[in-house]
Amino acid sequence: MQNTLHTVCGIDFGTSNSTVAIVRGGETTLVPVEEAHTTIPSAIFYPGNGSLPVYGRQAIHAYTEREPGRLMRSLKSILGSELMAEKTAVGGQYRSFESILVGFLAHLKAKTEAFAGTPIEAVVMGRPVHFVDDNDVVDARAEAKLADIARAAGFKTVSFQFEPIAAALSFEHTLARDELVFISDIGGGTADFSIVAVGPERRSRTDRSKDILASDGIRVGGTNLDMKLSMSAVMPHLGSRSKTKTGLDLPRWPFVDLATWHRIHTIATSKNMNTLKQILADCAEPGVFERYIEVIRGQNGHLIAARVEQAKIDLSAKDSVDIDLNDTMRGLQTKTDRPGFEQAIDAELQRLKKAVSATLAASGRSGADITTVFLTGGTSAVPAVKNLMTGLFANARTIEGDLFNSVGFGLALEAKRRHPEPGKSKKVSGKAKG
């Protein structure tokens, strides 16, 4: 590495996808973290032969090509959960979930430094407004753990900024006039909202605390919508609506775990497999639940989740879609439509509406005061979600930012503010974390 320009970065470590942007010589640039892509799926594949893990699209490709090994996705969802203290068998050995996350961030750091041509020591990490709903102690613990992980990955200086604030900074970068913007950042794992006064004169201010009127968020994201769609459209074909011999419903947990990205890898333990066999023996109609067990034995859980996710995406443009699962179970195919999907996610939509209202109330402003609704995060593309976000602010224009890169770009702008080039004054955002 020969480039000696002052370089810092921002990392949007997402539940579904991750992005990195750097500031080098005063210029902010998105990093091609996987070939020419400026996004990388937050996925890791550990080959069964114990060789080095692969990441992103390459990890998903290895899994879909049936290479022996184990795929792990949506690992950000583990932060703040009891799983962080556990180990799991990958690559021929037991690894802690913390070390797995360290490996992913170290991979992002290596890709970023190779692109920048210089070591990078300072990073501003994005974080949801709440890692965990309604538990400040666990939330603080999750942030501290992510800071430890980033330092273990090689960063010396680690700080945080709320993801919707980063999105606001990215939007502000394009403005020629003042705006009062409602930021809606709904990604794979969380929905985060902020109301921020932005504009060309404001972005040069040292103290931005008075510009940030409110921030709030909840743990509702694309993976929650995937789970609800899977439970309504796919899991009944694997036995979720079956009965025991005494007429009781089957336990719900096997189906919820199979429909939840970050729980799929936990199912195939010897203890769980014994329990599944007991459930099968007690089934009134065992043939359907045998499909479930075959899916687990064939390690097809992530494949089903990917097909459900794609169906969710396709429903943004189509009224109905087929979910073809023939390669996981011969002849297994189902169909879903947009009204059925929206009915399945109604509870999540109501939670989003309540969180938006709470953010607006905390800001002390009315919906009529908002001049722009800025949408980012992949889940913002879901029509029911988009309609909900825009419908609450009738007088505001709607701008769809770069759904996957806005937060990363804004985090780099924040890194530039916090870590100025030597000889330049330091400017720190008012709501900065860490």
Image (tube, grey):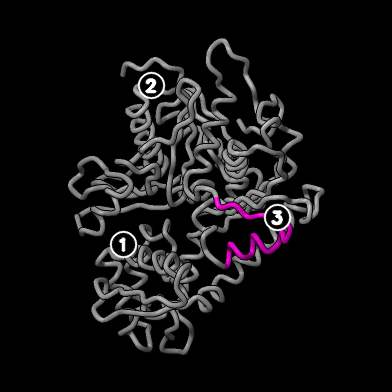
- Which disc is residue 319 wearing? none
Q: Residues within 10 Å of mark 2 (few under 14, many from 20)?
A: many
Q: Residues within 10 Å of mark 1 (few under 14, many from 20)?
A: few
The residue most toward the top is: 423
Dot 3 falls on a residue whose secondary structure is: loop
Please state the total of marks drawn on the protein image.
Answer: 3
Image coordinates for residue 113, horizontal then vertical, percent: 36, 27
Using the image as rendered, state which of residue 264 and residue 430 is in the foreground: 430
Dot 2 falls on a residue whose secondary structure is: loop
The residue most toward the left is: 49
- Looking at the rendered image, the quarter that the C terminus falls into is top right
Image coordinates for residue 1, horizontal then vertical, percent: 31, 19
Instruction: Specify the amino acid type for callout 2.
Output: Pro
CA distance separating discs 2 and 1: 44 Å
Residue at 35% in and 74% down: 323
Q: Quadrant of residue 178?
A: top right
Using the image as rendered, state which of residue 201 and residue 354 is in the foreground: 201
Image coordinates for residue 362, horizontal then vertical, percent: 78, 49
Q: Which residue is mark 2?
A: 119
Residue at 21% in and 58% down: 65
Magenta stretch, residue numbers: 384-400
Q: Earlier in the sequence, mark 2 or mark 1?
A: 2
Circles 2 and 3 in contact, beta carbons < 8 Å: no
Q: Earlier in the sequence, mark 2 or mark 3?
A: 2
Q: Which residue is mark 3?
A: 396
Look at the image and tell me whether residue 138 can be seen.
no
Q: Which residue is mark 1?
A: 270
Inspect the magenta stretch and tell me whether residue 127 lies in it: no
Instruction: Specify the amino acid type for callout 1.
Output: Ser
Dot 1 falls on a residue whose secondary structure is: helix
